[in-house]
């Protein structure tokens, strides 16, 4: 990703009605350009959750096969810890253990580590948390859109790309289902409001009424 391109895309979404005024959860992989653009466009209104699955894969890419299983097991345990601060502490400790023999894995683990625990810090757990800590739902949609675009053998111009991408997204929409853990959505909305407006003490009921 390119920061300028991502920033332009986000600005376009804002111009078409996307608002972060009441808080916004952004789930992303480790792309630095994407993280920088989100920060620039939405400032502190956006709560960023890094994809834990991408992190596990990235760390594993820096390890020999014999080390991958135990490291991944410790990462899963840390990321799923009910206390986000203890989970962060355990993951940081693991990075220290890897530092000498596998500095690449240690550096990969430390990058954006705080943002692995955003959903947990928002007080979300269970099935909804499992849905929100990875970018899999979005990537599934993108995969369907790409499959649709394979029908095109010659791209005439950029507008054609946009039209077919939109068609692919509409095709993906047919397979959308209610997300697992949806009953916790009011809790998430309230938590994001508190994140965006820490100076207030709004209750979930008042946030819902405002919405």
Image (cartoon, helix red, strand yellow):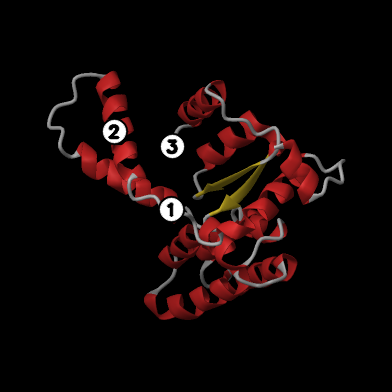
Residue contact between numbered discs 1 and 3, judged by CB atoms under 8 Å:
no
Q: Which mark is residue 137?
A: 1
Q: How many marks?
A: 3
> In this picture, is 132 found above or below 34?
below
Q: Give residue 123's position: percent from left, percent from top.
A: 71, 60
Q: Which residue lies under the disc numbered 2?
A: 167
Q: Nearer the viewer, residue 28 or 197?
A: 197
In the rendering, at what x and y percent does residue 44 appear? 72, 38
From mark 1 to mark 2, how far is it between C-alphas? 18 Å
| Residue at far front of view | 209
Q: Nearer the viewer, mark 1 or mark 3?
A: 1
| Residue 150 horizontal/vertical position (percent) | 18, 40
Mark 1–mark 2 CB contact (< 8 Å):
no
Nearest the camera: 58 or 144?
144
Left or right of 205, for residue 144: left
Q: Of the residues under marks 1 and 3, which one precedes in the sequence?
A: 3
How crowded pointer 1 is (Cα within 10 Å; few <14, some 14-19, many 20+) is rated as few
Relative side of 27 to 62, left or right = right
- Observer-side mark, 2 or 3, equals 2
- The residue that appears at 63% across and 36% down in the rendered structure is 39
Does 97 sit above or below residue 161? below
Residue found 26% across the figure and 42% down from its top? 146
Q: The C terminus appears in which quarter of the rendering?
A: top right
Disc nearer the start of the sequence (2/3): 3
Q: Which residue is mark 3?
A: 1
Q: Position of residue 161 (x, y in %)?
A: 27, 26
Please tell me whether residue 196 is drawn above or below residue 120 in the rendered image.
above
């Amino acid at each position: 990703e390119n920061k300028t391109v991502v920033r332009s895309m986000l600005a376009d979404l804002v111009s078409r009605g996307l608002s972060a005024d009441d808080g916004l959860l952004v789930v992303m992989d480790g792309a630095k350009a994407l993280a920088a653009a989100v920060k620039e466009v939405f400032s502190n209104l956006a709560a960023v959750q890094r994809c834990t699955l991408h992190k596990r894969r990235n760390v594993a890419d820096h390890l020999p096969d014999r080390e991958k299983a135990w490291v991944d097991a410790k990462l899963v345990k840390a990321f799923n810890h009910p206390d986000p601060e203890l989970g962060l502490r355990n993951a940081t400790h693991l990075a220290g253990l890897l530092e000498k023999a596998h500095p690449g894995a240690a550096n990969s683990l430390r990058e954006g580590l705080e943002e692995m625990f955003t959903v947990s810090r928002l007080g979300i757990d269970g099935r909804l948390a499992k849905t929100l800590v990875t970018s899999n739902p979005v990537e599934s949609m993108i995969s369907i859109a790409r499959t649709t675009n394979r029908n095109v053998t010659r791209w005439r111009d950029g507008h054609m790309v946009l039209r077919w991408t939109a068609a692919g997204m509409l095709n993906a929409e047919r397979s959308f289902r209610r997300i697992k853990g949806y009953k916790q959505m009011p809790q998430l909305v309230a938590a994001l409001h508190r994140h965006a407006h820490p100076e207030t003490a709004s209750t979930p009921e008042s946030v819902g009424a405002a919405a």
